[in-house]
Amino acid sequence: MQINSYKKRYIFFIGLVILTSIISQIMVQDRLEMQNEDAKLVNIAGRQRMLSQRIAKRVMYSYNLLQDTDSIYQNHMDTLAVQIDRFEKVHFGLINNEISLDLNKPLSQEVRNLLEENTPYLNNILFAGRAIIKDPRLEVFETSIDILEENDQEFLLRMENIVSSLQDEFEVKLAKLKSIELILLAVSIILILLSFRLVIIPLIRALTVKNKSLAVLSEQTNLQNRQLLEFAHITSHNLRAPASNLKSLIKFYQEENDPNEKALLIAHIETVSSHLNNTLEDLMATLKVKEDTKTDLEYVDFDYTIQKIKEILFIQIRESETEIQTDFRHCHGMISNRIYLESIFLNLISNAIKYSSTNRKPIIKIKAKKKAGRIKLSFQDNGLGIDMTKYGEKIFGLNNTFHQHKDAKGVGLYLTKTQIEAMGGEIFVESEVDQGSIFTLSFH
């Protein structure tokens, strides 16, 4: 299987994951809109029940005020008229799906039928209320009160059934949406797992096999053999950070509700995906062992390299609140093997974040200077530090670890030292437990 085929698979899987995430977000927005709309309906139905009771109470109270002053009585009649009009408008507004009720979706036919069945009782309540407004005589009041007593309780009971019916409909719709969301989430997880199973793991295996094959066929120089043996480590180690970031970014995207934050996460997903693709292309380029190693050299800008590493390690930097300080005033870059130098920056910065102290905010200071024809780079952190008395001679050994950390592999520093020496450089360490470490790189 050609490498380009793996890359196409990878892009295809990532595209599907992003698509399902977007669809899932659309479903979430629809659910929120539906819940908002349903809450409006239940609220309106509830207010109709209360308005019916208020009309009945207003009639009874007005009856008691019949012999009182005209101004007080008239005030109650005016209020009663407003309540009756509102009572009628909302009821028929629900039946006819009027826009004035601020509802974006029509009621189901079942609920509208229940409202229609309740209309005769509502009309009787309206008739009784308007009768006393039109003709406020004692006998009219008594007749209206009898009508209200006969119809109000039945109206309230039927409205209770309507509210229950609405709530049942809402629960059914909500359950369907939740099921779809769970299916989309499961699809996203499956796609991510498949991308690792069908792309990343086979790619690493293919590269490893290719690496071993080239090692057997390319015993021309010690440098060529060392480059081939290192390739498997570079591949597995350098792909871990962007792949892990991509998985975390997708998870955050699925959990985020803020549209602005989601747009920012999409941008980071695209950036990390681009870096992962570029890393794959760069790693593939190292498979071609060249007679003239000078053709691998190019000018590498330190600021650009730091920015690229920040994008690759975006999740780790944000979660740990790591502050990266740089000082490249005296030396902005160097002629080097770009793939190796970027790998060195990535390993030293990711290690500083990984082994940071929980008691303080991680701060990484990176400086570069040029003196006496040599370029010196220093990476200083305030992390856990290393017991140099105990581990000083083992720091750069393969598979050596010095802290209890689930992601510790003992490969990063070994790979870093190997790459530095391959470029004719040296690396030195100063460290103190719980005070941090300083890694100094020196190049001709």
Image: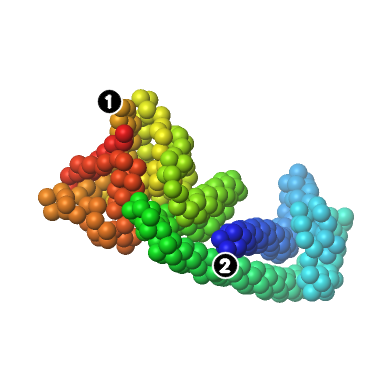
Question: Residue at 35% across / 53% down in the picture?
Answer: 221
Upstream in sequence: badge 1 or badge 2: 2
Q: Which of 356 and 87 lies nearest the eye of the viewer? A: 356
The residue indicated by pointer 2 is: 1
Depicted 61 relative to depicted 348: above or below? below
Q: By what rule are the colours in the image chosen?
A: rainbow
Q: Which quadrant is the C terminus positioned in? A: top left
The residue indicated by pointer 1 is: 372
The image quadrant of residue 189 is bottom right
Q: Secondary structure at mark 2?
A: loop
Q: Is residue 376 at all visible to an observer of this figure?
A: yes
**Left or right side of 433 for 276:** right
Question: Residue at 40% across / 61% down in the picture?
Answer: 215
Depicted 274 relative to depicted 34: above or below? above
User: Spatial distance from mark 1 to mark 2, Cα to Cα?
Assistant: 50 Å
Q: Which of 92 and 306 lies nearest the eye of the viewer? A: 306
Query: In the rendering, at what x and y percent does residue 286 appear?
Result: 46, 52
**Left or right side of 161 for 383:** left
Question: Residue at 41% across / 32% down in the picture?
Answer: 333
The image quadrant of residue 88 is bottom right
Question: Residue at 48% across / 53% down in the picture?
Answer: 288
Query: In the rendering, at what x and y percent does residue 260 appear?
Result: 59, 45
